[in-house]
Image: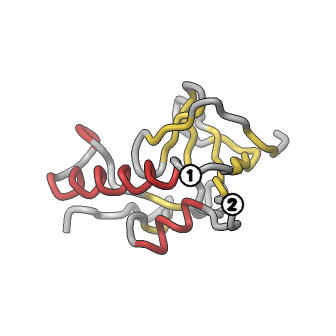
């Protein structure tokens, strides 16, 4: 797979680490390395393991929505897709100042580092 830029007529937040670009879900890497590192945010709705996680998920999604509302975002595909059935493209989204949105969510405390061997616990 070849990495490259992605153009979206419509870009919306699905949850704190997933966006929808023209109807296709894509997962934020936060400048991580596909299948090794990246970001993780709490799960929304029935995917959440507790009420606290559900509330944190809505807050993270809200912050992502704010960031996606900015003009001039640059969406870069890593060249990889995730290992779920939907095979979401793994992407980074850059603001006009060069800051990556997933990393910003991490720095602001809306996301945590994702590790495939150690899932995050948002309930404790």
Callout 1: helix, strand or loop?
loop
Q: Quadrant of the N terminus?
A: top right
**Residue 101 horizontal/vertical position (percent):** 57, 60
Q: Which residue reaches farthest top?
A: 23
Closer-to-camera residue (19/89): 19
Q: Are marks 2 and 1 in contact (CB under 8 Å)?
A: yes
Closer-to-camera residue (33/74): 74
Marker disc for residue 70: 1
Closer-to-camera residue (47/59): 59
The residue sitting at 36% across, 51% down in the picture is: 62
Q: Quadrant of residue 52?
A: bottom left
Give the mark nearest the N terminus, 2 or 1. Answer: 1
Q: Give the side of residue 43 with respect to residue 112, left or right.
A: left
The residue sitting at 51% across, 61% down in the picture is: 39
Query: In the image, is residue 22 above or below residue 16?
Result: above
The residue sitting at 81% across, 44% down in the picture is: 4
**Residue 92 horizontal/vertical position (percent):** 65, 54
Q: Quadrant of residue 97?
A: bottom right
The residue sitting at 39% across, 61% down in the picture is: 119
**Residue 20 horizontal/vertical position (percent):** 53, 34
Pointer 2 residue: 96
Callout 1: few (<14), some (14-19), or many (20+) C-alpha neighbours within 10 Å? few
Q: CA distance from mark 2 to mark 1?
A: 9 Å
Query: In the image, is residue 68 above or below residue 85?
Result: below
């Amino acid at each position: 797979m070849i990495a490259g830029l992605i153009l979206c007529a419509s870009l919306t937040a699905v949850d704190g680490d997933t966006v929808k670009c023209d109807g296709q879900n894509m997962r934020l890497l936060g400048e991580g390395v596909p299948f090794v590192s990246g970001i993780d945010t709490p799960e929304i709705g029935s995917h959440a393991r507790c009420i606290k996680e559900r509330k944190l998920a809505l807050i993270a999604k809200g912050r992502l929505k704010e960031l996606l509302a900015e003009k001039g975002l640059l969406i870069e595909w890593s060249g990889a897709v995730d290992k779920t059935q939907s095979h979401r493209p793994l992407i980074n989204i850059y603001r006009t100042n060069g800051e990556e949105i997933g990393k910003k969510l991490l720095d602001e405390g809306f996301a945590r580092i994702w590790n495939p061997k150690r899932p995050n616990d948002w309930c404790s």
